[in-house]
Image: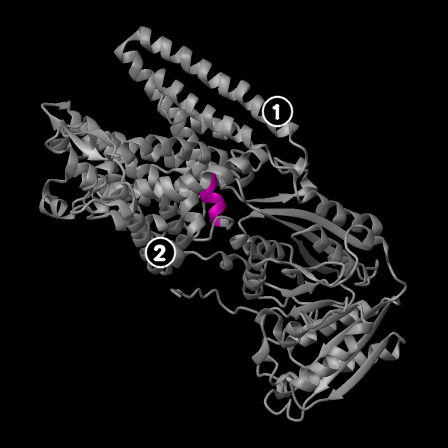
Amino acid sequence: METPKILLNVSGNCQNVPAYSNGIWNVAHGETILQHSLVRFHVQLLAMFLLSSSFHLVLRRFHLSRFTSEILQGLGEQQTNEACFLVQSSTRQFGYVLFAFLAGVRMDPTLIGKTGRTALILGSLSSVTAFIIIESTGFLFPKGLKTGGAKNAKAMFARIYMACMIQTQFVGVSFILMQLKMINSQLGHIALASSLVNELLRLAFGLMSGFLYTFNVSERAGVQTIIFSLIFLVLILTLMKRLMLVVVRITPEGQPVKEIYATVTVATVFLISTWGDSIGLNYLVGPLILGLVLPARSPLAEILIAKFDTIVSGFLLPLMAMLYASKVDLWQIMKEFESLLIFKISLIGFTMKVAATFFLAKFCKIPTRHAVALALILNAKGINELGTPLTLSLSLPPSFKDIHSTSGIFLIFLLQALQPLVKMLYHPAEHYLSYKKMSVEHASGDAELKILTCAYRQEDAVAAIKLLEYSNPTQESPLSVHGLCLEELVSSFTPLLINHQLGQKNSSSKGSRSQPIVDIFRYLKSEHKKSVQVQVFTAISPLKQMHEDICWLSFNKSCSLIVLPFHKKWNSKGKMVSNNNDLRNLNIKVLELAPCSVGILIDRRRTHGLSSIFNTSATYRVATIFVGGPDDREALAYALRMARSPEVHLTVVRFIGHDDHAHQRWQFMIDEDLLRRLRSEMSGGTNINYIEKKVRDGSDTSSTIKSMVGDLDLIMVGRSSHGTESEALSGLSEWTDLPELGPIGDLLASEDTTCPVSVLVVQQQIRKESPKIAWKFW
């Protein structure tokens, strides 16, 4: 059978190009499988992605994005495969349409109102500044961009080229914030809202400019364009929006949207793009507006992101970046650098825009270092800017269009080097460094105890409520509980911190996973109206950056303790059914950065669900393992507060080694002071029992703990992360699988422990004396 051929027009000549092979085992003598274009294209794709991934393994240590690695891979690589030309022409508009639509889906216009006037002022003035810089191009460089007093094609291209380099795009800002793990920081919220204001103003200005240009050409054509555009926009904002809301409404609560609706929506996106292009609008306007009217974080938005984001962000956009970069000829740029006037003009314009953004940020009373970081973030460049010079150069004279378009791509690559400076200038942890003693041990005995309780699932909230109810909330010694529902950000670029006391609701709150958790915290308020104050929040963020919300909320509310759920879950038979490594990493980051004490609650109880809230026993048996050190003191201080309730029976087990106090005399004195307080509490009641155990090493301690867990409801232990390891714990750290729990916490969380006992592992506040942020590459 003869190998099929396709006709491809390259440089005006028709050539027979073999499309695909008959297989590696059927290659004719004297031929190779690589002479077939499709096979070569597949091999080239594989090499491109492998090489860019290799670059990213190194460059990510310097906080450079994957986008930088993709451009670097394409630089200097000249296209020799004719299939690349087909792929580039066919995927460019296809990829940009989906990219614009998904970007609109991820945008949340309500972010502007939630951030405040700073973002609105900064975004508006930044947009005006960019317009002034673009319009002043001809006045700043009259010799190079004017011929006989009239602007030529090169001058027009220079303005558009500069606009590409100095504009602020919401999607580009979102990507760099995600890469730098700052998207839910204070600076990240300002940058997102400012870029969104800038994006909406630029979209409105672009539409108005298009209408005016059409009027100048023909008044009749201008009127028709305006009428058709208004009809186009009204249909999207009314009919299409209503149809998408109907799809969301008919979807059962908690169930995903049917895939057929997602397919129809994407088909509609391409239809709207074609329609907008036919009436004189940019082909990306329709998809972007359609994405904006779709409620972010709704079930339809989630399935669209889940189904199409991988193909767009993981394949189409990287492929476009590499193919665009492959057109750059570095030797030609170096050889003709003196004639690259547009390149130089754009670089100057970019510098002017960064400087202007910095001064605007200072005008909004943002600190200097943060203002510099914000200026760099708001001028980040991405995939949308990458294709603009190449697309616009098609209308330029052949004498200079190639060198100027490829130099624009190279300029975008150079600007990527500014990203690591942001990481050096700004760190979110600077905002919640605490110089006060925020811990249970240092809190006044009768003062209100403020606790931030985090819940990722309904079972987490139930376990936390059980702990709080036995924390002796009374009118004389009240509790202030801040419940935080943790919800992963999936279908949006915009993180949210929802305050349910202010009547705020998630846009998809009807099917929100956080609503049952909110109801559980409200149950605690209803049961203890006079002794417990409850405020409930929902943090919708990427899991890798959610620790910023937890730390900031605890700092803002002056909490003494953060209670986190353990990343493992067990069923009613004691078998582990869930092991969420992302949740474990979240706990580790909170332990490192928290401005107060932290407790990780390990829930091994056999009863789960809402019914276990009402199953309250007459006594709650609590034990505290005390070896010494600040973490153990924190656990004991919390246990003593619980023991003031007659329903709690507390057993304090102190393990003493032979030479435990030889190296930490000061810590030993502080420990003894707290134990004297314990003895005074014992004299006033009969629900506290104190036991001392002399042990030789960690194996003795382990055996004793295992023998006592069966008769308890809760064990409170310190993480023991400070100072020299006690002799009572010697040897245990060598077998620790979960260092964030410490040696005893790891022992109680191991598979060998099958008793239905809950464990609270406590770390006392680690005070940071100064906001020194180290630059870490590894």
Judge the density around disc 2: few (<14), some (14-19), many (≥20) Cα neighbours within 10 Å: some
Tell me the tag on residue 420. 2
* Image quarter of the C terminus: bottom left
Would residue 191 be counted in the magenta stretch? yes
First reached walking from the N terminus: tag 1 or tag 2: 1
Q: Which residue is pictured at 33% across the width and 19% down the height? A: 210
| Residue placed most toward the observer, 258 or 330 | 258
Compare residues 126 and 760 and report the one nearer the observer: 760
In the image, the segment drawn in magenta is 187-193
- Residue underneath mark 1: 246
Left or right of residue 110: residue 571: right
Q: How many marks?
A: 2
Colouring scheme, one of rainbow, by chain, secondary structure, one colour: one colour
**Residue 776 lies in magenta, yes or no?**
no
Q: Residue at x 36, y 9 (%)?
A: 223
> Circle 1 — which element?
helix
Where is residue 395 drawn, in percent x and y?
19, 26
Q: Position of residue 277 (x, y in %)?
A: 35, 20
Local packing at callout 1 (Cα closer than 10 Å; few below 14, some 14-19, many 20+) is few
Amino acid type for the residue under numbered disc 2: Pro
